[in-house]
Amino acid sequence: MSALAFTVMALVLSGPVPAMLARATWTTRAPRASIVLWQAIALAAVLSAFSAGIAIASRLFAPGPDGRPTATITSEIAVLGWPLWIAYVAVFALTLVIGVRLIVAVIEVAIATRRRRAHHRMVVDLVGKSQKSGLRILDVDQPLAYCLPGVRSRVVVSEGTLTTLADNEVAAILSHERAHLRARHDLVLEMFTAVHAAFPRFVRSASALDAVRLLIEMLADDAAVRIAGPTPLARALVACAAGRTPSGALAAGGPTTVLRVRRLGGQGNSLVLAGAAYLAAAAVLFVPTIAVAVPWLTELHRLFTA
């Protein structure tokens, strides 16, 4: 029953739950808490998948005639029978495959993203005008603004941004990009990208990655609003909306600009919604642990101490 419960939780938390949460509109009024909730769901899905495999594997140690857990392959097969033993081993092997895929995905995403950023950082340093605080100015007429996160971070704007936008709008757009760098939003995106790549296509949901991207931009918007106010930021976002962004960068503009500008003119963030999201995140992590994992671990303890 524990293995079945873990399996159901893994499937639900990696598919239907992300799809439902991605359609929710309240998350835009509590972006930070919503990201925490998304992280809790992703972590719970991964832990549930691993726990399902381990719970299946623990069935290989079924009690033998003496009441003690079986300790050899032959004794396991004698107790379980060939069909059940093969099924348990296959599920455990699948769990190991998912674990390896997750590790490989984390490494691949990290290496590929940093390689692209390093290459673009080198190009920006060569062709851009250097300013203080890691700011680079490109000789481009179209307004654009983005940042390259990392140890050697850069904020990149175009000449078009500086000539088109007013001073308070430039301050807003720079505050937006520096908020990305300060909070290391890129690491959050890397985690969700790796989890998305690790899970099989038939259970994973792309909505999680898209929703987190939007919420991260909203978090940076909130930081810019505290510096320059909503109106200058909204104007700056509209001006930079069509700017092209290199892969691996975090841009101020993009396809979500209209939604974010509307949010700046709507209701502010809600402490009540944020509190509810934090409670939901805690529940997603701890309720399954108490309801399923603890009884399962207790049963394992009884088996091995018999």
Image: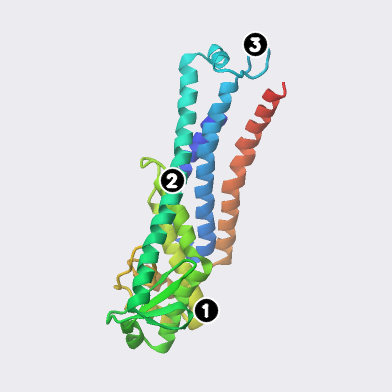
- Which residue bears the numbered disc 2? 104
Indicate the quadrant where residue 44 lies.
top right
Give percent across and percent down for residue 285.
58, 47
Give percent across and percent down for residue 263.
42, 71
Extreme-left residue of the structure: 141
Give percent across and percent down for residue 38.
50, 54
Q: Kindly identify which numbered label has been placed on residue 226.
A: 1
Is the N terminus in the top left, top right, bottom left or bottom right quadrant? top right
Among the two numbered marks 1 and 3 on one chain, the one whose residue lies closer to the N terminus: 3
Look at the numbered disc 3 and give the secondary structure of its residue.
Answer: loop
Among the two numbered marks 2 and 3 on one chain, the one whose residue lies closer to the N terminus: 3
Q: Is residue 157 above or below residue 78?
A: below
At 41% across and 51% down in the image, what residue appears? 108
Q: Are marks 2 and 3 in contact (CB under 8 Å)?
A: no
- Kindly identify the amino acid type of the residue bearing the numbered disc 1: Arg
Look at the numbered disc 2 and give the secondary structure of its residue.
Answer: helix
At 62% across and 45% down in the image, what residue appears? 286
Give percent across and percent down for residue 61.
60, 22
- Kindly identify the amino acid type of the residue bearing the numbered disc 3: Pro
- Which residue bears the numbered disc 3? 65
Of residues 74 and 218, the one nearer the viewer is 74
Is the C terminus in the top left, top right, bottom left or bottom right quadrant? top right
